[in-house]
Amino acid sequence: MALNIKPLADRVLIEPAAAETKTASGIIIPDNAKEKPQRGTVIAAGKGTKDEPITVQVGDTVLYGKYAGTELKLEGKDYLIMRESDILAII
């Protein structure tokens, strides 16, 4: 089922990766101590501006700033919408 949302200009819709539930040594992290994920998958992207075309593509895994973007909930899932300039790297 495809989302019926199209970001405008240089905005990108990202589905954040799931937060870690265990440490490398096997300790379970409680919900209130989990950190916000800083990577996710691009779900939709705008066309860019006339001066700068968009460089990320749908399906790219990206890293973004900790407080970047605006959170929204669509069809029971959490997403972030942010400017492409808030994306730090493509993995």
Image (tube, grey):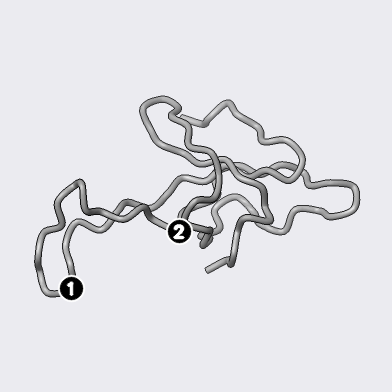
Q: Quadrant of residue 75?
A: top left
x, y percentage for residue 73?
Answer: 43, 29
Is residue 32 rendered to the left or right of residue 80?
left
Closer-to-camera residue (63/32): 32
Query: Residue at point 57% right, 42% down?
Result: 13
> Three-letter amino acid code at disc 2?
Arg
Dot 1 alpha-carbon crowd within 10 angstroms: few under 14, some 14 to 19, many 20 or more? few
Give residue 18's position: percent from left, percent from top. 32, 51
Task: Pinpoint residue 72: horizontal percent, then vertical percent.
Answer: 48, 32
Residue in the image at 54% along x and 53% along y = 59
Number of the label disc, if any, that sits on residue 24: 1
Q: Which residue is identified by label 2?
A: 39
Q: Position of residue 35 (x, y in %)?
A: 31, 55
Left/right of residue 19 with respect to residue 51 in the rendered view: left
Most foreground residue, 80 or 3: 80
Kindly identify the residue that appears in the image at 77 percent across and 40 percent down. 9
Alpha-carbon span between mark 1 and mark 2: 18 Å
Q: Secondary structure at mark 1?
A: loop
**70 left or right of 16 in image:** right
Judging from the image, what secondary structure is the residue with disc 2 in?
Answer: strand
Up the image or down, 32 lies above or below 27; here it is above
Seen in the image, is 27 located left or right of residue 4?
A: left
Q: Earlier in the sequence, mark 1 or mark 2?
A: 1
Residue found 54% across the figure and 50% down from its top: 68
